[in-house]
Amino acid sequence: MDGMFGWNIMAALVALLYLAVIVWVVSQIVRSAELNELERWVWAIAVICFPLLGSIVWFIAGPHPFGIRLARGPR
């Protein structure tokens, strides 16, 4: 029984760390001066819907992967 308790604690810690990373990434997205409002929404939705992939792309590629910019209208 003690072995199961250890695994449950480990799983809870991993889940808590996973959630903390998602919250941190979303907070970085919201505070990013490089993004306009539309880009913030797209990134936040991407990270919430695809937490692992969205977070990895944000960490590796940054706010504008492949130079992609979203604009509401013509510039």
Image (cartoon, helix red, strand yellow):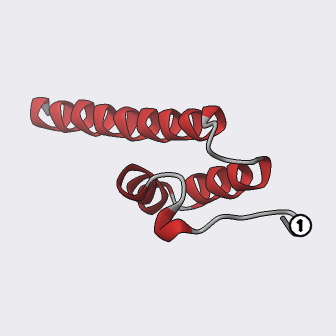
| Image quadrant in which you'd find residue 13 | top left
Instruction: Say which of 63 and 41 sits in front.
Output: 63
Q: Residue furthest right?
A: 73
Residue drawn at point x = 53 percent, y = 67 percent: 67
Q: Quadrant of the N terminus?
A: top left
Mark 1 — residue?
73
How many other residues sit within 10 Å of disc 1, few (<14), some (14-19) or many (≥20)?
A: few
x then y, percent, for residue 34: 61, 44
Q: Is residue 62 left or right of residue 29?
A: left
Identify residue type, mark 1: Gly
Number of marks: 1
x then y, percent, for residue 54: 49, 58
x then y, percent, for residue 10: 22, 35
Q: Is residue 68 left or right of residue 5?
A: right
Q: Residue furthest front?
A: 75
Residue drawn at point x = 64 percent, y = 36 percent: 33
Instruction: Say which of 51 and 33 sits in front.
Output: 33
| Image quadrant in which you'd find residue 28 | top right
Whether residue 18 is situated above or below residue 53 in the rendered picture: above
Q: Secondary structure at mark 1?
A: loop
Residue drawn at point x = 73 percent, y = 51 percent: 41
x then y, percent, for residue 60: 35, 55
Whether residue 14 is situated above or below residue 60 in the rendered picture: above
Residue drawn at point x = 89 percent, y = 66 percent: 73
Instruction: Say which of 41 and 63 sits in front.
Output: 63
